[in-house]
Image (spheres, rainbow, N blue to C red):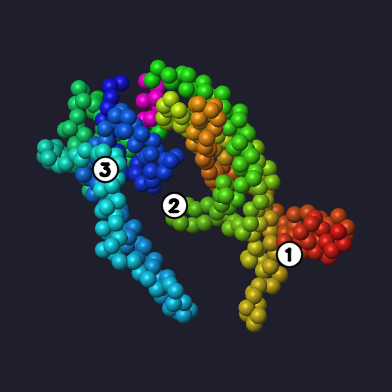
């Protein structure tokens, strides 16, 4: 592999990274490769304009939300919430951020110059990818594809990072363009060309038992921060089914597998890698059963409102970022988050409003009569 490698990024790459250069982010790792003169970034001006468009849309949403908050604050005489952001100030900040982004990436900008517009429309009318469905919205992807084909060749190849299926298909016949769906796969391909790669993988793999134990401990100790469970599922029409849980308690957490996925970056001091992990998690989930409660219009409250508990069993797959100190032979950092939902759910046991019984009187214990020490609210004072 000849360095620096030409790399072009689609807009969705930035969105996935949330434009963040924080320590464990893919953009931060990308910058290290740029600083090491291993990667040269080429950004299409189409991507630049799409980022600008998305930032304008976000700014308009912020202003609309601020206006709604202001109206509600005035309704309840809350004078402290009255400031609506200045749109022009936010637009200047967005432009400055985009300029700084290009500087950080040391990006060269690909323009429309030299683009064969005739071939662009030929592809459109012939429904050649990305125009398979003759969508006008595919013109930006088509322009990006033509820019890459125009600016690179067999002697000067390029790697495109995108998750856009239409753009992938548009570049599939271009023999001097390699497409990766993510930056992490690019990083791993670069790492594999290094003569030290096999040594690095062995180092990471030697840490896996310790990493597995650390992940398990973190999940148990900080489950509310590191695990998100949703009992609701949404279809394409926006319809929902399931349960809107009020409280979730994780009864059993067991990390099952931890395997090396990619080597993102390494030097003489540190190793950065991504791991594929899986864990078996059982949770007790509570919700208020409004459907079977009775509404008291005079008292303006629900009568006979029970709290129901469900048991959910999940097998979660998640990624973990790890940074290893090669000099001190220790794990410097672990970052991960676990999302539980319909795709991870193995079983769901529809429960009742009780989750145990009182050892003294034998009554069912639920949230309304839980004494907090294993006994019901009537027996708890005796212990």
Above/below status of 80 relative to 212: below
Residue 16: where, in percent of width, then height? 39, 44
- Of the numbered discs 3 and 1, the one sitting upstream in the chain is 3
Query: Does label 2 or label 1 sit earlier along the sequence?
Result: 2
Cα separation between marks 2 and 3: 40 Å
Pointer 1 residue? 368
Q: CA distance from mark 3 to mark 1?
A: 58 Å
Q: Residues within 10 Å of mark 1 (few under 14, many from 20)?
A: few
> Which residue is depicted at the point 60% across and 33% down?
212
Query: Of all residues shown, which one is farthest toward the top?
Result: 195
61 lies left or right of 8? right
Q: Quadrant of residue 144?
A: top left
Identified at 65% across, 37% down, the residue is 254
Q: Is residue 50 magenta?
A: no
Residue shown at 54% from the left, 27% from the top: 329
Residue 61 placed where, x, y %? 35, 62
Q: Mark 3 packing: few (<14 Cα in 10 Å), some, or many (20+)? A: few
Give whichever of 312, 213 is nearer the camera.
Answer: 213
How far is mark 2 from mark 1, CA to CA?
37 Å
Where is 51 relative to 273, above or below? below
When the figure is inspected, residue 207 is found, relative to residue 378, above or below; the finding is: above
Tags 2 and 3 touching, CB below 8 Å: no
Which callout, 2 or 3, points at the residue further toward the start of the chain?
3
Residue bearing the label numbered 2 = 236
> Magenta stretch containing residue 192, yes or no?
yes
The residue where tag 3 is placed is: 103
**Highlighted magenta segment, given as a residue range:** 186-193
Majority secondary structure of magenta residues: helix
Q: Quadrant of the C terminus?
A: bottom right
């Amino acid at each position: 592999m000849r360095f620096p490698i030409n790399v072009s990024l689609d807009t969705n790459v930035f969105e996935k990274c949330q434009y963040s250069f924080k320590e464990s982010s893919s953009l931060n790792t990308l910058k290290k490769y740029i600083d090491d003169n291993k990667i040269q970034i080429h950004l299409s001006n189409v991507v630049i304009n799409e980022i600008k468009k998305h930032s304008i849309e976000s700014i308009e949403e912020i202003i609309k939300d601020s206006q709604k908050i202001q109206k509600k604050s005035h309704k309840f005489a809350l004078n402290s919430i009255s400031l609506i952001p200045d749109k022009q100030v936010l637009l200047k900040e967005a432009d400055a951020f985009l300029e700084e982004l290009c500087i950080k990436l040391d990006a060269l900008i690909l323009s429309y110059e030299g683009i064969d517009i005739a071939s662009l429309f030929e592809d459109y009318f012939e429904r050649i990818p990305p125009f398979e469905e003759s969508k006008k919205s595919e013109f930006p992807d088509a322009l990006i594809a033509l820019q890459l084909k125009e600016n690179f060749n067999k002697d000067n190849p390029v790697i495109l990072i995108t998750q856009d299926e239409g753009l992938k298909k548009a570049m599939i016949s271009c023999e001097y363009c390699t497409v990766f769906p993510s930056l992490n796969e690019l990083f791993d391909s670069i790492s594999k060309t290094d003569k030290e790669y096999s040594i690095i993988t062995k180092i990471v793999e030697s840490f896996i038992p310790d990493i597995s134990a650390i992940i398990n401990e973190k999940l148990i100790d900080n489950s509310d921060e590191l695990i998100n469970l949703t009992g609701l599922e949404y279809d394409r029409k926006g319809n929902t089914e399931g349960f809107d849980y009020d409280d979730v308690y994780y009864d059993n957490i067991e990390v099952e597998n931890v395997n090396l996925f990619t080597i993102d970056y390494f030097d003489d001091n540190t190793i950065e890698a991504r791991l594929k992990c899986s864990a078996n998690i059982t949770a007790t989930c509570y919700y208020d059963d409004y459907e079977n409660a009775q509404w008291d219009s005079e008292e303006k409250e629900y009568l006979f409102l029970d709290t129901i508990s469900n048991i959910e069993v999940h097998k979660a797959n998640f990624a973990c970022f790890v940074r290893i100190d090669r000099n001190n032979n220790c794990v410097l950092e672990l970052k991960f988050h676990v999302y539980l939902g319909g795709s991870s759910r193995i079983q769901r046991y529809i429960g009742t409003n009780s989750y145990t019984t009182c050892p003294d009187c034998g009554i069912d214990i639920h949230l309304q009569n839980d004494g907090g020490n294993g006994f019901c609210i009537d027996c708890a004072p005796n212990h």
